Image: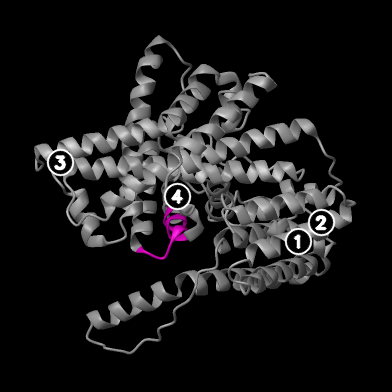
Amino acid sequence: MIFHSLDFVVFFLITTVIYWRLPHRGQNVLLVAASYLFYGYVHPWFVALIVATTLTDYTVARLIESRPAQRRRWLAVSLTVNLGLLGFFKYFGFFVENVHAALAAVGWHVSMPVLHVVLPVGISFYTFQALAYTIDVYQGRLAACRNLIDFAAFVSLYPQLVAGPIERATHLLPQVEQRRAWSWPHAREATFLIAWGFFKKLVVADNVGLIADKVFSLAEPGFTVLWAGVFAFAIQIYADFSAYSDLARGLARWLGFDLVINFRHPYMATGPVDFWRRWHISLSTWFRDYVYIPLGGSRRGPTRALVNLWITFLVSGLWHGANWNYVLWGAWHGTLVTVSRLVTGRRRETPRSDAWAIVEPLRVLAMFVLTCIGWLIFRETDMHMLWRDLTLSPWDTTIGDRQIGGYLFLTAAAYSLPLWIHDIWSVYGTPERAAETSPAAGAWGGWPTMGRALLAGVALAAILVLRSRQSLDFIYFQF
């Protein structure tokens, strides 16, 4: 069930009306039931996996708290079950394929088992969310949840179940456990987030996504056409994923929950480190807190810090998918952050000045180009095609290639213009608000209610007129 479907609209309206007529405990029971219905709508057996994860981490956390002498053993149980399920469903085929290739390379021709495993949607997200909860209980950051229904609602909350944001128990679980009251201001903000999210998905992401898909389906695109396609994909993945996060936050706000902000205008980043403070924040902070810091972080010297950094980026690349291009994508960003750290060290940002006003846009542009190179690696799953694309000469092009590439670039830029205006104004026009508000409210946060309602109406009208004729799935559903 996807957000931009009639089935989901009916589902959400019915459950929301019933939800606000129930007492607190009834609301949580309904949340669990609705979330399981939402998750198992296409493949009912998916529900068995999330139930297994929920029961495992609920039980293990209680045992960690009640039997501190055996806490390491119980944490190992949680790690084994969670990572075991994730590894089997997401990486089994990748593992078998690479083992088979390695054995064949040394002359051992072995018949390997072939299993056509369906990847459960959202398993990477809810596994990390549940696992972080158990680790937090183990480290004493919070007490184990006593109520199974509350914990099940925390793990399976359907607005953010499939593609995040990855919530921390310290933030979301107290909201599940506390009574929630209806608020018209929250409902208005939620509606604006939903309208902005639908605009980004249906008008921006889906239209430029068709351009990217067409370019990457070509056998040998020219240089200009290729990089127009990469630009289109860069817009698509940002608009698509941030749209899902806005929709998740808006839908959750209608139910009385405040989810974390997942994007802060990432293409306005001035460098690699700044980019990861802005892009998929809930995942980047997850890897920081549960991989990088446990490995030692920067506490054991600069060399070990870089090793830990590289491990973190390689693992984060593999998290996105069972293919070597995702590992290379992680390595690319690991390289960028490493070079940035070696060049800039730990010095603090200098205060903005007139000279900085000239230099900063150039840094933003340079970082966007480097990010686009990363998106080419991310998008191209065929290693031979990736090498061909990366080594394609800008001089090896034709007039027709330049004309078509220019047209595709301008088309993608036109569809994404509202997004660029919003992000640029949020960062440079309202710096005092941009850091504190959601991306949907960043540029328009100071507008009166009627102004924002009018803007939401314009967004909905644009959806009706400009939406893509072909609806595409959210990109991060595959992860």
Locate residue 161, reporting x and y percent: 63, 56
The disc at residue 211 is: none
The disc labelled 1 sits on which kind of residue?
Val
Residue 309, numbered circle: 4
User: In the rendered structure, which segment of residues is drawn in magenta?
Assistant: 312-323
Look at the picture and state if 94 lies above or below 221.
below
Counting residues from the start of the chain, the first of labels 3 and 1 encountered is: 1
Q: Nearer the viewer, mark 3 or mark 4?
A: 3
Task: Tell me which corner region of the image, top left, top right, bottom left or bottom right, holds residue 155.
Answer: bottom right
> Which of the two residues, 324 or 379, is positioned nearer the viewer here?
379
Q: Disc 4 versus disc 1: distance between alpha carbons?
A: 37 Å
Point out the frontmost of discs 2 and 4. Answer: 2
* First-in-chain label (4 vs 1): 1
Residue 108, given in percent of the width and then of the height, sits at 26, 88
Q: Is mark 3 on a helix, strand or loop?
A: helix
Q: Which of marks 2 and 4 is nearer the N terminus?
A: 2
Position of residue 192 in the picture relative to residue 138 (left or right): left
Kindly identify which residue carries mark 2: 28
Which residue is painted at 55% across and 46% down in the image?
Answer: 244
User: How many badges with numbers are in the image?
Assistant: 4
Residue at far front of view: 465
Q: Which amino acid does label 4 sit on?
A: Leu
Residue at 68 percent across and 37 percent down: it is: 190
The tag on residue 32 is 1
Label 3 or label 2, whichever comes before in sequence order: 2
User: Which mark is on residue 401?
Assistant: 3
Circle 4: is it few (<14), some (14-19), or many (20+) Cα within 10 Å? many
